[in-house]
Amino acid sequence: MNYVLNYRIPASNNTTHMTGNNTFILTTDADIQFTAESAVVLLDMLDSDPQVGAVCARTHPQGSGLLYWYQVFDYAIGHWFQKAAEHILGCVLCCPGCFSAFRCCALSSVLETYSTEVSNSKATEFLIKDMGEDRWLCTLLVEKGWRLEYCAVSENHTHCPEDFDTSFKQRRRWIPSTVANLSLLITQASEITRGNDTVSILFVLFQSVLVFSTAISPATVILVIASGFASAYKVSDSSVIAIIVLLLLLSIAYGLFCIYGKPQQQLDVAKLASFILVIFMGVVFAGNLKNMIYDGASLIQDCSLSETCAKNGTFIFPLTPSTMYLTLFTLLFIVAGLVHFNEFSCLIHGVWYFLALPS
């Protein structure tokens, strides 16, 4: 990249029409599979708008086994919802290095900052720069006023981790770097919104909600498990509180172990905890599925279009909150799958995603 930006383009200015604005770099990983048409689509989007600094594509995982199935659904909803939402509401915040196209003059505008060394005394710099190089590069591009876009028509395939250790290490890099870069974007919101027309206060607020939801995700998972037991198996309030306290203590214990334990021991404990939590989620899923079937049958039996579900003059909602919650989420994913009909089969793997949600 440095050769193209600092030597090839300047050397060609006098002999060709090659400039930083009409020259693009396509980045790929070694295992990426893509077609020429997919690359051309990315270049067309860059060529059509001089304000676009980079474009990313729809990435499909390849592999086999349970972890591959999990990632099929994870990649699908990540592109269907996250990438698409960023593209429409503002601009994409991460064009992955596995398969994206960048405008050379956009890269030149941030290359000096991007090339700076990571300070050993600042943990935030390590999280922002070293843990996610492509996201850090895109953060700099957004700060400089460039628009980053997502193109679902351009597709590529990459091999995903198939064993727990590799997958866990990958996620342990991705999640902290994502949160760190989004936090940087939020803290510099006033400057970025002034310098980048595609980033608005509402878009920053949207990203703030995502960061907040990530921060409270452990508590969310604990409540999902506890409420699942409560609604599916009618356990007492004291039992629900006991489940919440137990899961909370286990989460704190694992957090401390991650600070003081050895890396391989952390992975071993994570495997064991994930296995136990999958069993918990399986029990919760079975119970909620039973509830949904029961509520659906009751709704058909007790309600009709011509009468109101009421008893003694008091309105009774025919569905439990957990049933309504799961039903709405299921319908949301089904609608998204229908919109992306060629990828509808990805929804099959949503079951494994739900079971592995705590891990």
Image (tube, helix red, strand yellow):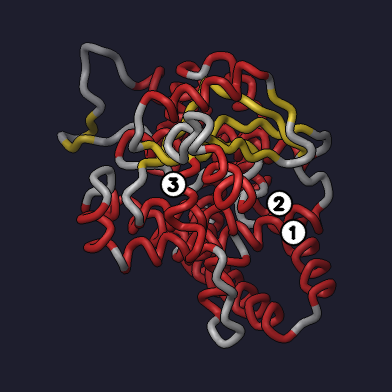
Label 1 Cα neighbours within 10 Å, binned few <14 / some 14-19 / many ≥20: few
Label 2 Cα neighbours within 10 Å, binned few <14 / some 14-19 / many ≥20: some
Mark closer to the observer (3, 1): 3
- The answer to whether marks 2 and 3 mark residues whose Cβ atoms lie closer than 8 Å is no
Residue 140 visible somewhere in the drawing: yes
- Nearest the camera: 240 or 186? 186
Name the residue: 83% across, 74% down: 265
Q: Residue 276 carries which label?
A: 1
What percent of the width, then of the height, locates residue 158?
73, 35
Label 3 secondary element? helix
Q: Residue 106 carries which label?
A: 3
Q: Residue 177 carries which label?
A: none
The quadrant of the image that shows the C terminus is: bottom right
> How many angstroms separate mark 3 from mark 1 (CA)?
47 Å
Label 2 secondary element? helix
Sooner in the amino-acid sequence: mark 3 or mark 1:
3
Quadrant of the image occupied by residue 118: bottom right
Name the residue: 46% across, 37% down: 19
Which residue lies under the disc numbered 2? Answer: 278
309 in relation to 235, above or below: above
> Label 3 sits on what residue type?
Ala
What percent of the width, then of the height, locates residue 214?
47, 59
Sooner in the amino-acid sequence: mark 2 or mark 3:
3
- The answer to whether marks 1 and 2 mark residues whose Cβ atoms lie closer than 8 Å is yes
> Label 1 sits on what residue type?
Ile
> Label 2 sits on what residue type?
Val
Quadrant of the image occupied by residue 82: top left
